[in-house]
Amino acid sequence: MYLQERVVENRLIGYPDQGIYKLVLYGQVAKSAKPGQFVHIQVSDTYDPLLRRPLSIAGIDQDREEVTIYYRVAGKGTDLLTRISVNEQVSALGPLGTGFTIPHTGELLLIAGGIGVFPLYSLIQVLSTAKVSVKLLWGGENQEFLESADFNYLKYLGVDYEVSTLDGSLGYQGLVTDLLEKELKTSKTPTGKEIKSARLLRAAACGPRGMLKAVTAICLKNDIPVEVSLEERMACGIGACLGCVCTVRGKDGNLKRKRVCKEGPVFDGEEVAWDAEV
Ligand SMILES: Cc1cc2nc3c(=O)[nH]c(=O)nc-3n(C[C@H](O)[C@H](O)[C@H](O)COP(=O)(O)OP(=O)(O)OC[C@H]3O[C@@H](n4cnc5c(N)ncnc54)[C@H](O)[C@@H]3O)c2cc1C
């Protein structure tokens, strides 16, 4: 659905070098948005760039009719987005895609790499009222990055978390997959319940493809079902152009193509053919 949303907030947060912005949109998207879905935003009034830019829904406030998005300036499109002022209208297509499964009981372990934390914020927010124990493992380059990606918001959400940085400036020094291995080695489940309830454990992850592949392997080795949110460059965003396909293995063992914008961006990690040509 093409919608005109009003910009409530669009500002740099954190360290300027990190180039991370918080964008809040008022309008129709919030009414039906779900964690893991995204909006496809028109960033220019001209044909340059022609294509919209996909950004994850990181916060949903149905009462205020607002969605929150965090974006990192990556190139021309996101740079143009920074110039849109409060009270201007933006054309947003969405909410689009298939989001995360929302569990109603048990424990959910979330694993984020870099800006992959953004779609997980909305999942944490939605689960804060459910009977689900949530723990987030989040890896980033350094403390400046984590703080700029709204680390404080996690404290506000009151979620249990552990972070890792490559340079050790905050949390564990190393990769988030090390944190995951450590977490699953302990005799208790991540949120502290006895191991007997571990069968209720699920995982969801978002981050770079290599990290998601490794996270899937670790989770499956531990019999933990895992959902992953994939990122592909995309054009139409509604499943028509087939520009964002990924390769999955069907139940019959044959390789198939699925559209990241339509059947995804969230997929069962086990179904993704990680090593197939895409
Ligand atoms: C479903 C989905 C959700 C996303 N959610 C967010 C989000 O919440 N916050 C956020 O900051 N970014 C998010 N992204 C990535 C974001 O869409 C891209 O960074 C943006 O489109 C880049 O546009 P640009 O014109 O600024 O850069 P471009 O000039 O188009 O590209 C700059 C650089 O970024 C790379 N790039 C562009 N698009 C992608 C992509 N889709 N995947 C991987 N690399 C890409 C290019 O290869 C190039 O190296 C998401 C992408 C997808 C597919």
Image (cartoon, grey):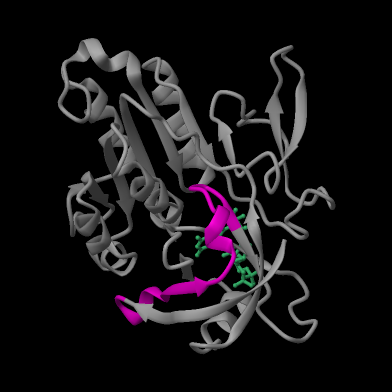
Residue 213 visible from this viewpoint: no
User: Quarter containing ligand 1?
Assistant: bottom right
- Picture coordinates of residue 127, whole percent (x, y): 34, 41
Give left or right: position of 23 versus 243: left
Q: Is residue 77 above or below residue 87?
A: above
Residue 76 is inside the magenta segment: no
| Residue 169 visible within the image | yes
Percent x, y of residue 67: 48, 64
Q: Is residue 173 above or below residue 23?
A: above
The extreme right residue here reads 241
Q: Please report the residue visible at 44 percent of the width from the left and 52 percent of the height from the top.
A: 116
Q: Position of residue 69 (x, y in %)?
A: 47, 66
Which residue is pictured at 76% across the width and 53% down the height? Answer: 238
Q: Could you tell whether 200 is left or right of 188 in the image?
A: right
Direction from residue 52 to residue 217 in the image, left or right? left
Q: Quadrant of residue 104?
A: top left
Q: Residue at x 81, y 48 (%)?
A: 242
- In the picture, measured across the screen, residue 155 lies left or right of residue 118, that is left
**What residue sits 42% from the left and 76% below the top?**
19
Farthest residue toward the front? 63
Task: Please identify the quadrant where the N terminus is shown.
Answer: bottom right
Depicted 145 relative to depicted 136: above or below? below
Q: Is residue 11 above or below residue 250?
A: below
State which quarter of the image contains the C terminus: top right
Q: Which residues are magenta?
A: 14-38
In the rendered image, residue 31 lying in the magenta stretch gets the answer yes
Between 223 and 263, the one lying in front of the other is 263
